[in-house]
Image (cartoon, helix red, strand yellow):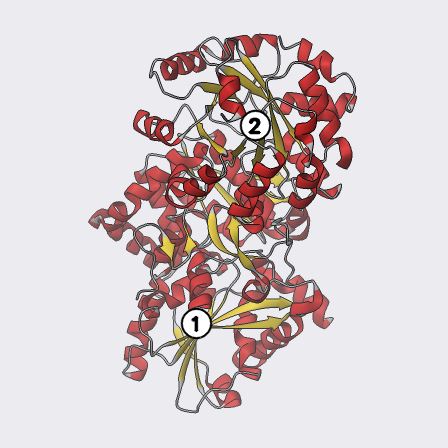
Amino acid sequence: MNRINQTLQQDKKLLSIYFTAGYPDIDDTLPIIKDLEKSGVDFIEIGLPFSDPLADGPTIQKSSTAALKNGMTTQKLFEQVQGIRDSVRIPLIMMGYFNPILQFGVENFCKKCAETGIDGLIIPDLPVEEYHENYQQIFEKYDIRNIFLITPQTAEKRIRFIDSVSKAFIYMVSTASVTGSTSGFSRETRDYFQKVSALNLKNPQIVGFGIKDKETFGQATEYAKGAIIGSAFIKHLNENGTKNISDFIKNIR
Amino acid sequence: MSYQVNKKGYYGDFGGAYIPEMLYPNVEELRSQYLSIMQEASFQKEFKDLLRDYVGRPTPLYYAERFSKKYGTKVYLKREDLCHTGAHKVNNTVGQILMAKRLGKDRIIAETGAGQHGVATATVCALMGIKCIVYMGEIDIERQAPNVARMKMLGATVVPAKSGSKTLKDATNEAIRDWINNPVDTHYIIGSVVGPHPYPDMVARFQSVVSEEIKNQLQEKEKRENPDYVVACVGGGSNAAGAFYHYLDIPKVGIIAVEAAGKGIQSGESAATSALGKEGIIHGSKTLLMQSEDGQITEPYSISAGLDYPGVGPMHANLFRSGRGEFISITDDDAMKAGAQLAKLEGIIPAIESSHALAIFEERKFKPDEVIVVNLSGRGDKDLSTYIDYFNL
């Protein structure tokens, strides 16, 4: 069974952490992954940096620009995670925009993921229809899970379509925004979490965007299976480098 | 086979809507309604009235006699430079502001490079009394002070794009992020035939008035609707899309797209996307774009800010790949010479973008009885400081 699906069966609220590969330094990818696992994180999202990250706010944009300047490439990232399954057991998901993956070759990318032990992908600008028509078979051939986003503006019919195509979890964007731009969840947002939960989808939901501390993690996981922290963790790296990662995680739960 | 967009939003292999889910409702709202709104009689009337009374259409189709004599062929100039605000850009912004009103939007965002599209957007927002925010790269704001002032005078807020390379592509990213953050009340007026479907098609339709007029005017002057060739410069490609539109599916009309070679195609400082680009995704569209081997989008270069875009609209990518269009690239130097020459031969100072289209006659020869229409997309006022610096005027 895919590691993501195994983890989703655990009877607890799951914490996933996003970071940009190659940031703060080009060789920080592995140490960060290992520290995160040691700190008790349940999933890790490894960001493949892109020159034009449309859906990201300033914090992740800056980390992407810096990572590219540090020399991060798709090839380099796969080299860094080569052999990672000798030491890391939790699910690893790569998050990246579609163009670099398209240039690497979608099949080649999935194959590399399977070889190195990457379990899933999040590609924000690959729409579900395009995936379903052109790429789903390739992903399934290599047992790579593709994770889709939904937002408060996503209609129920579309949520159900996304649920039918998904085979791991649904990435529930908390508010209509780019990453890193909210502070605390409104009543309205929490109602939306509850409403999606009441749809009884076959895939659990993991909330992303706007989670940064114990309070927001608690609110996000009141109805959802877990939550993802991205910008807040990048900010921690900005301020502390790769030190004290376990302190950051302890402050979440 | 048609060179128009198909039902799924593709031109051959190119187009589509590669957008984050956060943008889906906005884009889907537009996609599902743009055609029916554009076909409404009241929309058509309002659009045509504004193009006539506000923009100053139809723009003349001018037989450039001395220019024609020099090159031994018959050259007509479609005078988009005479449009209000100085370029064809306003055809699209008039159409889109009417679209935004019918969609019930009361906030407009736009991206701009040199500032021409920003000015055209600020203009129609002032006309309609709608709030306008224009994203512009921090570097472009420094380079294009007069247009920044024009936008401010027209009541728009100009927001500097500070991410990435701080130019047009980053301004476009910032506008898209704004749209993600404001999904309900905001319409995004894209300035070219780029972006996710339905933008390339919608913008092309608003610009298609250019070739519609060429047909009527040529009938009057030459007793034929169809020229032998229609020539236009291509950055994103909106003036070209307008000039080509009604000729796309008439094979006997040759289509010539002129790109900016910058300092030379192999110089590393160029914007000739057809020569240097590879298939990929930029701003929600699958098209040809300039990128690194690793799929990172690279910075183009041209002396002309309007041609300085790393991609090209999907319609043009398909014209290139299918061979329907002939693609020529022109260096900075050759474009500047062609601009200076038109000023002296015809008393018209063209935008440097349009100068690229005029420059092809040095290399590309035509027969004496052939009729060539060049879309003179904009006037050179905005480029005066570049002309001054280049020629030490």
Residue A182 image offset from top left, x and y in percent? 55, 20
Residue B37 image offset from top left, x and y in percent? 26, 45
**Residue drawn at (63%, 22%), measured in percent from left and top?**
A89
Q: What secondary structure is marked by label 2?
A: loop
Question: Is the residue B115 above or below the residue B125 in the image?
Answer: below
Viewer-nearest residue: B110 or B122? B110
**Residue drawn at (77%, 34%), measured in percent from left and top?**
A27
Along the horizontal axis of the image, is B135 left or right of A78? Answer: left
Chain bearing tag 2 is A
State the CA–CA distance, disc 1 to disc 2. 42 Å
- Reading the image, the residue beneath label 2 is A179
**Residue drawn at (60%, 38%), measured in percent from left and top?**
A115
Question: Is the residue A156 above or below the residue B104 in the image?
Answer: above
Q: Estimate how packed mark 1 is, as few (under 14), some (14 to 19) or many (20 or more) residues with alpha carbons within 10 Å.
A: few
Residue A127 image offset from top left, x and y in percent? 43, 39
Residue B358 image offset from top left, x and y in percent? 53, 76
| Image quadrant in which you'd find residue B84 | bottom left
Along the horizontal axis of the image, is A59 left or right of B259? Answer: right
Q: Estimate how packed mark 2 is, as few (under 14), some (14 to 19) or many (20 or more) residues with alpha carbons within 10 Å.
A: many
Q: Are marks 1 and 2 on the same chain?
A: no
Which residue type does callout 2 highlight? Answer: Thr
Chain bearing tag 1 is B
Q: What secondary structure is marked by label 1?
A: loop
Answer yes or no: do the residues labelled 1 and 2 have beta carbons within 8 Å? Answer: no
Q: Quadrant of the C terminus of chain A?
A: top right
- Reading the image, the residue beneath label 1 is B323
